[in-house]
Image: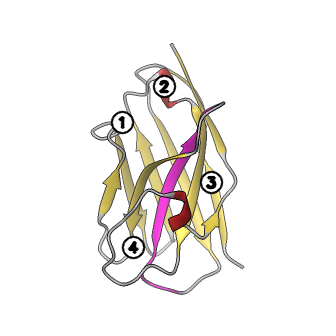
């Protein structure tokens, strides 16, 4: 059974940092992508960042580029999202998601429909 366990959320002041982790398990494919999405109250869920296991390539939403960094530990199947210079607008529930059926070499995407498995959310709150 595929499982994604997200952790690391919390409360931080604007300008501060948080690190989210997503521990994946239950699959053996070596070419997959894991992404972070977020959903603020009253808003649609939006893609934040994604990383490909096969080559470590990454993609970021424009709103977080330069502030967030995604990385992967392939041996542990764990993806980390380092979030710096946090802003109140970053407040949301953050979800990690996995695409285990991506064609080899396919471009990364930040669309919900592109991800088959989802973890539970972790709350990130940034106070002003």
Q: Are marks 3 and 2 in contact (CB under 8 Å)?
A: no
Numbered tag placed on residue 6 in the rendering: 3
Which circle, 1 or 3, is nearer the viewer? 1
Viewer-nearest residue: 55 or 116: 116
**Residue 53 has which mark?**
4
Q: Which mark is residue 63?
A: 1
Whether pointer 1 and pointer 3 mark residues with C-beta atoms closer than 8 Å, the reply is: no
Give, as a single range, the part of the protein colored magenta.
29-40
Query: What numbered label is drawn on residue 89?
Result: 2
Q: Is residue 24 above or below residue 65?
A: below
Residue shown at the point (38%, 58%) measured from the top left: 71
**SS of the residue under disc 4:** loop
Distance from disc 2 to disc 4, alpha carbons, whole Å, reads 29 Å
| Mark pair 3, 4: CA separation | 18 Å
Q: Earlier in the sequence, mark 3 or mark 4?
A: 3
Is residue 93 within the magenta segment? no
| Quadrant housing residue 62 | top left
CA distance for labels 1 and 3: 21 Å
Mark 3–mark 2 distance (CA, rounded to whole Å): 20 Å
Say whether disc 1 or disc 3 marks the residue closer to the N-terminus: 3
Circle nearer the viewer, 2 or 4? 2
């Amino acid at each position: 059974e595929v499982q994604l366990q997200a952790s690391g959320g919390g409360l931080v002041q604007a300008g501060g940092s948080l690190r989210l982790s997503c521990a994946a398990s239950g699959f053996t494919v070596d070419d997959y992508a894991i992404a972070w999405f977020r959903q603020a109250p009253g808003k649609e869920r939006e893609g934040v960042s994604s990383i490909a296991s096969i080559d470590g390539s990454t993609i970021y939403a424009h709103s977080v580029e330069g502030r967030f960094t995604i990385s992967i530990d392939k041996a542990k199947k764990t993806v980390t999202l380092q979030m710096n210079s946090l802003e109140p607008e970053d407040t949301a529930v953050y979800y990690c998601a996995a695409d285990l059926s991506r064609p080899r070499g396919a471009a990364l995407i930040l669309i919900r429909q592109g991800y088959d498995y989802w973890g539970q959310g972790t709350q990130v709150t940034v106070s002003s």
